Amino acid sequence: MKIVSTLALTDAQRAVVKAAAPSAELIDKQCRTPEEVDELGKDGCDVMLTFRIPTNLATGARGLKWIQLLSAGADHALNGPLSSSSIQLTTASGIHATSIGEYTIASMLAWSHRLHIVIRAQQRHEWARRAVVNSLDVMRGKRLGIVGYGSIGRETARLGAALGMRVVALKRNPNERRDTGWCPPGLGDPEGRIPERWFGGDQCAEMLRESDYISVTLPNTPLTVKFVGAEEIAAMKPGAYIVNIGRGAVIDEQALIAALKAGKIGGAGLDVFEREPLPAESALWDIEEVIISPHVSGDFRAYLDLACELFAENLRRFVSERPLLNLVDPKLGY
């Protein structure tokens, strides 16, 4: 068996992979362009570990049976050469749960304690006590609504519950409460025990109407574009705070801007946008109650180390012909 990684691995990372398939040939090389990915896979392989999908699946990468993506989302892969392929595709869902869960709660804490206001005041050398003292709040006892209860949503729920928040969750099929993806011990909510109430995919407005804080963790698929649209945003509480770490297309950005400008909702923490980088002329930059970050919520220093642990577990499953974790359903888009 031949394994190709389009990222250069450290000795420790190679050892983790090799331990899962000792007899396999492992080739790893940093590829920064699609052409470099094609070149690395031109002699064929069985397995590929990559961010990028080869563009020449029809003529290159002979014998490729399985691609382990290093991203949680698969939309970029399914819209390309894999759209008509039988190659198995798995995502890195689960490895981002800690970093994004922490980011989401941090954004909510920053907003509730008005840190975004006082930091901006600090830059102007202003003592902003009067500006914030009457608007400070705590998150304990507040309702946290999670739109998309996957690995990230579950870890956000665990952290929110630890702060004393009451969690409700929305899922495509709320009757399937167990998480079957990759989940390290102690992380998230694999059995689906935290939410006090569950909502289906057609109940988004109803859930948002009850939520003080909202976390949107949906992937980008044809069914999730503007899933949180004008109707859903209109249903939100006047003081609600919404965080989007999924994909920018999931929220109707113009409807969100209109609601924020009119003061119909409390604020927003945004790490993803309809256009990235966020254009300089976007109104979002200048809305005081918006906290913006440049699509970094899922990044952390040990990213590839954890990805190799997930890959190794899936590699053991691949060798023993067991079902792979985080297997993408092309019809669902994730």
Image (spheres, rainbow, N blue to C red):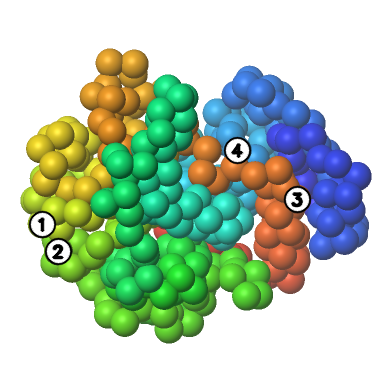
What residue sits right under mark 1 in the picture? 235
Tag shown at residue 209: 2
Q: Amino acid at mark 2?
A: Arg
Disc 4 versus disc 1: nearer the observer: 1
Pick whichever, 182 or 274, lies toward us: 274
- The part of the image, by quadrant, that contains residue 250 is top left
Separation (CA) of disc 2 from disc 3: 40 Å
* Residue 33 position in % (x across, y down): 62, 21
* Residue 121 position in % (x across, y down): 40, 30
Q: Residue at x 77, y 46 (%)?
A: 3
**Callout 1: few (<14), some (14-19), or many (20+) C-alpha neighbours within 10 Å?**
some
Assess whether mark 2 and mark 1 are in contact (beta carbons under 8 angstroms). yes
Who comes first in sequence, dot 2 or dot 4? Answer: 4
Disc 2 versus disc 4: nearer the observer: 2
Q: Is residue 9 left or right of residue 180?
A: right
What residue sits right under mark 4 in the picture? 51
Separation (CA) of disc 1 from disc 3: 42 Å
Pick whichever, 151 or 89, lies toward us: 151
Q: Residue at x 29, y 65 (%)?
A: 145
Q: Amino acid at mark 1?
A: Ala
What residue sits right under mark 3 in the picture? 305
Who comes first in sequence, dot 4 or dot 1? Answer: 4
Q: Residue at x 65, y 44 (%)?
A: 300
